[in-house]
């Protein structure tokens, strides 16, 4: 195994793949100080204000003269990013030919959509019934859980005392959960007096099958637990009629996410997700990329891959609207990466974004979706959502992802209502946190090829789509967080 990697020929820094010591000679360069794993060192002298190049793009500029062999990080590099930008559409050909076929065992729903789990979900219209939903989940899982893949509730604090877009976002997210194909049936649980009461929520939900979706207003019943159990008996019986059948991989919708990133995220795990995204596109499937603030600094790469000028304009609005959101609250637009990212070797937002956006591969951007807007275009789509892990995975689910691929270099146990596949960027993490990690991309710096690793990874994804449980599912890690931007009464 090599001790370092120079990602492209244009780069003037290399990345340590293991801790390097002062005095070591690497690539003809004598290190002037210790360099932690995942961190960068200079391959040549870099003058003050000169750009630091990684991934063949600037990741910032030197704040002081950097000598060949110096450790390159936050103490001597600063972002080049500032303010709002104007963009020009410079398209290049990157469409993917659908030339591969594969299948998995999924649940075909009455509306033709396909789920990869057959669960019964309890969706709360308001946080006031969180305790009731947890009690119903426990009792129904014990009584009826063997009929389906599980009975699950998802607590949240919203649904009342919200104003404007926040209230609409809550309704849109909850409606998307009711409609989600991984849910064979749904109990909508309400208090009764909330802003998002059943009558109002139905206006957002639209048409539904009353055999699949049932409503319980707890204030209307003396024994809400008993009434809830009756409804869950009916719902689990209904959902149990669905059986796994063979369907093409083109029915897969997979979300792409990273969290707890390190210096290897953009070298191993994120490029692996990009290769898998391209491979799924070749099968006619769909991938969703979010974390808009972590596109800043690399957004033009995605914009130039948009299928047409209309999609490009939507991508520009996606980026600028999120920057305006920061500015509206007098917050620094480029206040990123996080302390954990920096400890792992990520220096600036450009450094982080150029690594993050690799999850989207090289294929054409087919669509740009607002928060919880359902995906309709096959191929790669961009989704409005923040970088926050739980908010982002919830947004991916809200646009129709049946599964989330989640890369991490430092480790996290977080899980979504949909299967969340944890991909380690490095082998030490995969070995240490084997109870969290589903796949080790660290092999890519240990001699494994991208093509072989991607094929193995894709087989793993088809197995998970066919019922193999992820580590987060095994542990019962299932969270949602609804994106909030405004006043709470």
Image (tube, rainbow, N blue to C red):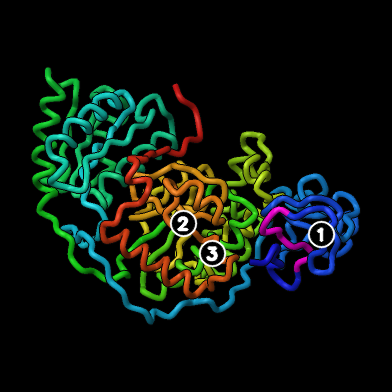
Q: Tell me the magenta residue range.
A: 11-19
Q: Nearer the viewer, mark 2 or mark 1?
A: 1
For label 2, count other residues whose C-alpha is less than 10 Å away and answer few (under 14), some (14-19) or many (20+).
many
- The structure residue drawn at horizontal position 47% and vertical position 53%, both measured from the top left corner, is 406
- The structure residue drawn at horizontal position 31% and vertical position 69%, both measured from the top left corner, is 249
Q: Is residue 313 visible?
A: no
Residue 443's mark?
3
Label 2: which secondary element: strand
Q: Residue at label 2?
A: 256
Q: Is residue 299 above or below residue 480?
A: below
Label 1: which secondary element: loop
Q: Residue at label 1?
A: 24
User: Alpha carbon of mark 2 to alpha carbon of mark 1: how far?
Assistant: 38 Å
Q: Quadrant of the C terminus?
A: top left
Q: Nearer the viewer, residue 255 or 219?
A: 255
Q: Within the magenta stretch, is there residue 62?
A: no
Of callouts 2 and 1, the N-terminal one: 1
User: Alpha carbon of mark 3 to alpha carbon of mark 1: how far?
Assistant: 24 Å
Q: Quadrant of the N terminus?
A: bottom right
Q: Nearer the viewer, mark 3 or mark 2?
A: 3
User: Alpha carbon of mark 3 to alpha carbon of mark 2: how far?
Assistant: 20 Å
Label 3: which secondary element: helix
The image position of residue 50, as x and y in percent, is: 86, 59
The image position of residue 200, as x and y in percent, is: 27, 34
The image position of residue 32, as x and y in percent, is: 86, 54
């Amino acid at each position: 195994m090599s001790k370092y990697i120079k990602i492209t020929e244009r780069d003037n820094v290399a990345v340590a793949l293991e801790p390097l010591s002062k005095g070591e000679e690497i690539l003809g360069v004598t290190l002037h100080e210790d360099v932690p794993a995942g961190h960068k060192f200079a391959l040549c002298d870099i003058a003050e204000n000169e750009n630091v190049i990684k991934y063949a793009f600037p990741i910032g500029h030197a704040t002081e003269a950097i000598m060949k062999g110096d450790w390159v990080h936050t103490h001597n590099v600063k972002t080049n990013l500032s303010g709002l930008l104007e963009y020009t559409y410079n398209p290049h050909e990157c469409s993917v030919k659908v030339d591969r076929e594969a299948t998995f065992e999924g649940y075909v729903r009455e509306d033709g959509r396909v789920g990869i789990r057959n669960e019964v979900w309890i969706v709360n219209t308001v946080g006031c019934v969180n305790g009731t939903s947890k009690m119903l989940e426990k009792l129904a899982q014990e009584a009826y859980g063997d009929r389906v893949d599980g009975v699950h509730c998802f607590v949240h604090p919203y649904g009342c005392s919200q104003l404007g877009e926040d209230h609409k976002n809550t309704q849109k997210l909850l409606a998307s959960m009711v409609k989600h194909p991984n849910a064979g049936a749904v109990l909508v649980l309400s208090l009764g007096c909330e802003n998002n009461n059943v009558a109002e929520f139905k206006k957002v939900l639209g048409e539904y099958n009353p055999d699949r979706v049932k409503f319980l207003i707890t204030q209307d019943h003396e024994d809400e637990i008993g009434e809830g159990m009756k409804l869950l008996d009916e719902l689990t019986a209904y959902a149990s009629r669905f059986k796994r059948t063979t369907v093409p991989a083109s029915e897969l919708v997979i979300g792409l996410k990273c969290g707890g990133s390190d210096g290897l995220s953009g070298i191993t795990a994120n490029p692996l997700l990009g290769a898998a995204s391209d491979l799924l596109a070749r099968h006619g499937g769909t991938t969703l990329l979010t974390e808009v603030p972590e596109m800043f600094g690399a957004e033009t790469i995605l914009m130039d891959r948009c299928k047409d000028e209309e999609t490009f304009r939507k991508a520009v609005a996606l980026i600028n609207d999120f920057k305006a959101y920061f500015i509206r609250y007098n917050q620094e637009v480029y206040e990123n990466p996080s302390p954990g990212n920096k400890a792992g070797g990520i220096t600036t937002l450009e450094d982080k974004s150029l690594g993050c956006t690799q999850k989207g591969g090289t294929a054409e951007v087919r669509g740009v979706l607002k928060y919880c807007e359902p995906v309709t275009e096959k191929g790669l789509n961009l989704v409005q959502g923040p970088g926050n892990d739980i908010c982002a995975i919830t947004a991916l689910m809200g646009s129709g992802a049946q599964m989330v691929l989640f890369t991490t270099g430092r480790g996290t146990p977080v899980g979504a209502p949909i299967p969340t596949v944890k991909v380690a960027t490095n082998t030490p993490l995969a070995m240490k946190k084997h109870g969290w990690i589903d796949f080790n991309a660290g092999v890519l710096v240990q001699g494994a090829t991208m093509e072989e690793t991607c094929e193995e990874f894709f087989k793993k994804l088809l197995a998970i789509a066919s019922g193999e449980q992820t580590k987060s599912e095994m542990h019962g890690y299932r969270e949602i967080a609804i994106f909030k931007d405004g006043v709470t009464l």
